[in-house]
Amino acid sequence: MRARILVFVACALAGCNRSSKAGADAGASPSAVVTPIPTAPLPAAPPAAAPRSFADLAAKADSAVVFVRTLQEQRGRTGRRRVIGEGLGTAFVFDPNGLILTNNHVIEHASDIRVIFGKKREMKAKVVGRDPPTDIAVLRVDEKNLAHLPLGDSDSTRVGDWVVAIGNPFGLSHTVSAGIVSAKGRTGQDVKGLGDGTGYYNFIQTDASINPGNSGGPLLDMAGRVVGINTAIRARANNIGFAVPINMVKELLPRLTKDGKVNRSAIGIRVSSLLPEDAERLGVSDQGALVRFVMPGGPADKAGLRNDDVILKFEGETVQGPEKLR
């Protein structure tokens, strides 16, 4: 059997809006137009030679990293609230006007969120927006002129680049660790047990030490720019951590800060990676996204997509695997 090789543009598959809880089976498409937040030109990264010290970078970035403490409360039969859970995590300021980034799982179900800056300065934070499928949340504190971290370009990072993680592992505030980018493009299949399996994952893998409590903290390049948000670790493994790439976050920020959530379009397909046996059966290379299922009557069906089609390009960009379409 020969596969049809597809190169198509998003406008050919006009989808309907779905809530951020839409699963992977719905075939969520990245075709929605997003206006990126304005950013200043990024300084050139320094040479990639092994640094003698990370001290200057850590000292400059540390004031923008905050400790997150959450409480989960439940109202009893008498009407009184009682604490049923407490959580610890990390976050960082990305806008001097009080906007903070962290992981959604750090603040999910919290009835009270506190962020603690250096010198034990504690402030109450409110949720501005959150997106469970990407595990991203934006918080706000009532404070201006805050020290903040510039958002970098995760696409420009290369495997082998040095990176630094700052966070609060096990409540040990402002802990700094260093390592390299071990791999890129890790998916939910690589990070077992995170979320509900419907996430839009495209993780950066690093061997910088990440532990419980580091979630939501920044992964920095050698210019002190955020290239990822530390999110997960591989259970029962050493030095295998994962960070959400900051370019994915930057695409979502305009929606999260304006609407508080992300509505996605669905074209009605289920896609997967091309396994070696699939490539051999269809007579194609192992690159692209394999269409496993087409929803009858959906936009993809009406546009002519069929099972066993292979998608190689989307909106002019090469599709290496299914994560590009999420």
Image (cartoon, rainbow, N blue to C red):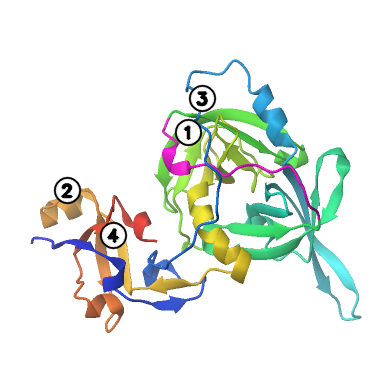
Identity of the residue drawn at 33% across and 73% down: 267
Query: Is 6 rendered above or below residue 183?
Result: below
Q: Earlier in the sequence, mark 4 or mark 3?
A: 3
Identity of the residue drawn at 12% across and 56% down: 281
Disc 3 + disc 2, Cβ < 8 Å? no
Q: Nearer the viewer, residue 316 or 318?
A: 316
Q: Inspect the image, locate mark 3, and give the three-letter code of the amino acid beneath it.
A: Pro
Q: Please, which residue is most extreme toward the bottom here?
A: 297
Tell me the tag on residue 285. 2
Residue 296 figure quarter: bottom left
Marks 4 and 1, how far apart in space? 27 Å
The region drawn magenta spans 143-159
Q: Inspect the image, locate mark 4, and give the three-letter code of the amino acid beneath it.
A: Phe
Q: Which residue is mark 1?
A: 181
Q: Inspect the image, locate mark 1, and give the three-letter code of the amino acid beneath it.
A: Val
Give the structural element (helix, strand or loop) at label 2.
loop
Disc 4 + disc 2, Cβ < 8 Å? no
Query: Is 276 rendered above or below residue 58?
Result: below
Q: Which residue is mark 4?
A: 314
